[in-house]
Amino acid sequence: MTDDIFFAGIADLNARLRKREFSTVELVKAFAERLEKLGPRYNALALPLTRVAVKRAKLVDDELKRERFRGPLQGIPFGAKDLLSFAGHPTTWGAKPYASQAFDETATVLLKLDKMGSVLIGKLSMVELAGGGGYRTAAASLFGPGLNPWDLSCWSGGSSSGSASAVAAGLVPFALGSETSGSIITPSAYCGVTGLRPTYGLVSRHGAMALSWTMDKIGPICHSADDCGLVLQAIAGADSKDPGSAEKSFYYTPQFARQFSDLKVGFSSADLGWADEATRPAFQAAMQVLRSTGARFVDVSLPDLPYGPLADVIIGAEEASVFENLISSGRVNELADASQAAGLRANLAIPATEYLKAMRIRSLLKQQFRELFAGIDVLAAPARYGTAPKVADPLDGPDSVPLPVPPGPGMRRLIQAGNLAGLPALSLPCGFAGNLPVGLQLVGPAFTENTLLALGREFQNKTDWHKRRPPLVS
Amino acid sequence: MSDKFTRRQLAGAVAGSAAVSFAALKVMGQAPHARDYDQEARDSHEENSSVLAAFPIPMSLEPAFQFKA
């Protein structure tokens, strides 16, 4: 096997397994050894599962020999964010107070992937408690700061830090992450990989750490939009164990995608002014590529709503309830980031009336987004308006206001807005600023993942940013 | 030279801000006070509260309880 397999797509790997170019055991061993060797370089590895994985891989090989095919994920190794329970093994939620925690049950998404013949080779690092308390340093994790494969002095992003850096460095073909308010989109953009945040309720959260019951989502981080579609098809679906389940399935059908010339893409002309200067050429070029698909572009504005306070209050109140015992017991002080502990303590004091007011405004928000999407099919915006920050820099540095001040707010609050509305989003690598990746974000109405993936796939047919490899591992 | 000013720089330029005092303390060799994260978190909550309190909504508007996208 050559190094190329570490950056190969899922369908390619599966085809080669079926042709018996290599066995599942060989593939799993190759990735697992690489994950164990290089994962610590990026603080990406929470728990290696090599022995369990090789045992599982032997069973998959038996099936392949009997020509019992289970689909394109059969035999494909993967990693999972350490907020997903895997029975009998530690699930730390990235936080010291839970360092020795283990569950008897396996998360629904891991069971679904197991059923498809995918092989879990390791748990991946994350920001402690998915960062809900409001972390201010990259070091807010039991595993240390997530390091970016493109530049080890920079952060990999959070909270799905290890999931994104492991995919970027070719340590796993794909990984599962989770997002409450940016935790898939941000690390995907910073690490130059493709990340999909599914519609709220499309993927079961049973067996995942709860941060915010009304906002948590689980989704794939992969090398391409195509791979995200294949993984989403495997993990989506109704689950009676998840009260938030939308009871819908998902079938990845790029062959039935709408004509791109029928699509209306909403964008904000103010966005370019808000983006860091070094990232602007990449965004400009990315918008040109999107235009070249034939899609029509419409200048739009996000509804004028207090997205930041809404997300703070809703996530804050829900996580205070989830972690009430941790906070009351004082063990919250064991968290690596003192500001996160303080945030959680303060969240206990959010009044019920304030939470309800936020949830009432959220009804308005959903209604206004339905109205916005009556005139467009997709929103396109920078995934992040800058590149990955330095690991040593505080994450709450002062906001910079570019001069001249852009003519409007742009879509800088699209991550919070999209999460509050429960909408799907796709982050696509769209270029570089210096040595660091830049990401483009596509957002659509609920349950339009196929449209986002088709447009993302077309974008990746026309570009090769998603095929670039970090220098240290290429 | 950067074409951007940070909010802190703008604030400092307009009035004698905390940032200016902070810089002065550093020059004088005195350690600035350690950050009080609890107070910052409470301040942030107060700010959120006032923003949401000032947001007008109709009395009939119900919370997004049955949250299905």
Image (cartoon, rainbow, N blue to C red):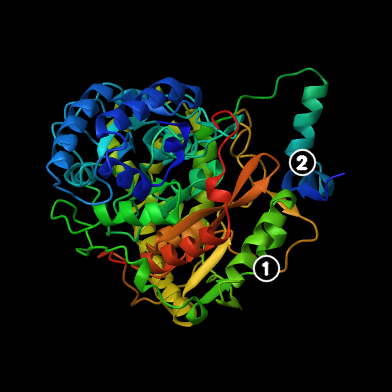
Residue A317 appears in the picture as rendered: no
Amino acid at the residue labelled 1: Gly
Q: Residue A408 got which mark?
A: 1
Residue that badge 2 annotates? B17
Judged by depth in the image, the label closer to the viewer, 2 or 1, is: 1
The percent position of residue A155, horizontal first and vertical second, equals 56, 34
Spatial CA span between label 2 and label 1:
27 Å
The percent position of residue A256, horizontal first and vertical second, equals 35, 73
In-image side of A286 versus B19 (left or right): left
The percent position of residue A374, horizontal first and vertical second, equals 44, 81
Give the residue at x 43% y 69%: A365
Amino acid at the residue labelled 2: Ser
The percent position of residue A360, horizontal first and vertical second, equals 37, 67
The one nearer the camera, A67 or A161, is A67
Give the residue at x 31% y 63%: A252
Secondary structure under the numbered disc 2 in the rendered image? loop
Give the residue at x 72% y 56%: A281
Q: Residue A372 got which mark?
A: none
What is the crowding at mark 1: few (fewer than 14 residues within 10 Å), some, or many (at least 20)? few
**Relative to B23, does residue A450 appear above or below in the rendering?**
below
